[in-house]
Image (cartoon, rainbow, N blue to C red):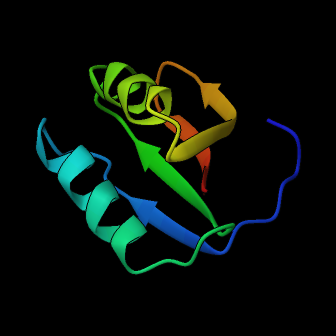
Amino acid sequence: MATQNFDQELNVSGLDCPLPIIRTKAAFARMDSGQILQIKATNPEFTREVRVLTAHGLYELIDESITEQQLIYLVRKK
């Protein structure tokens, strides 16, 4: 993952689905259009949730980093 600025950070590591996506949507509800949220997670199912979230056009996946220990996503609210 390249060094990227973000406006807010959300750590949902250790949480089981659906809590990570629920907390992600709640964080976006408090953000303005154009702002970027960095999301850190450990649940591999969250990758699919991020793909679904960004497929509908309200959010844009800017970058992702997936390792065995952690998933990190940068998502912009449109």
22 up-or-down from 28: above or below: above
10 up-or-down from 39: above or below: below
Give the image location of residue 8, x and y in percent. 57, 73
Give the image location of residue 62, x and y in percent. 72, 39
In the image, is 23 to the left or to the right of 72? left
Residue located farthest toward the right when viewing the structure as drawn: 3
In the image, is 27 to the left or to the right of 71? left
Residue located farthest toward the front when viewing the structure as drawn: 57
Residue at the spot x=88%, y=40% of the render?
Answer: 2
Give the image location of residue 24, x and y in percent. 33, 56
Residue at the spot x=25%, y=45% of the render?
Answer: 21
Image quadrant in which the C terminus is located: bottom right
Give the image location of residue 32, x and y in percent. 56, 78
36 up-or-down from 44: above or below: below
Residue at the spot x=66%, y=75% of the render?
Answer: 7
Image quadrant in which the N terminus is located: top right
Residue at the spot x=44%, y=23% of the render?
Answer: 51
In the image, is 5 to the left or to the right of 74? right
78 up-or-down from 35: above or below: above
In the image, is 76 to the left or to the right of 39? right
Which quarter of the picture shows residue 52?
A: top left
- All told, the count of numbered labels is 0
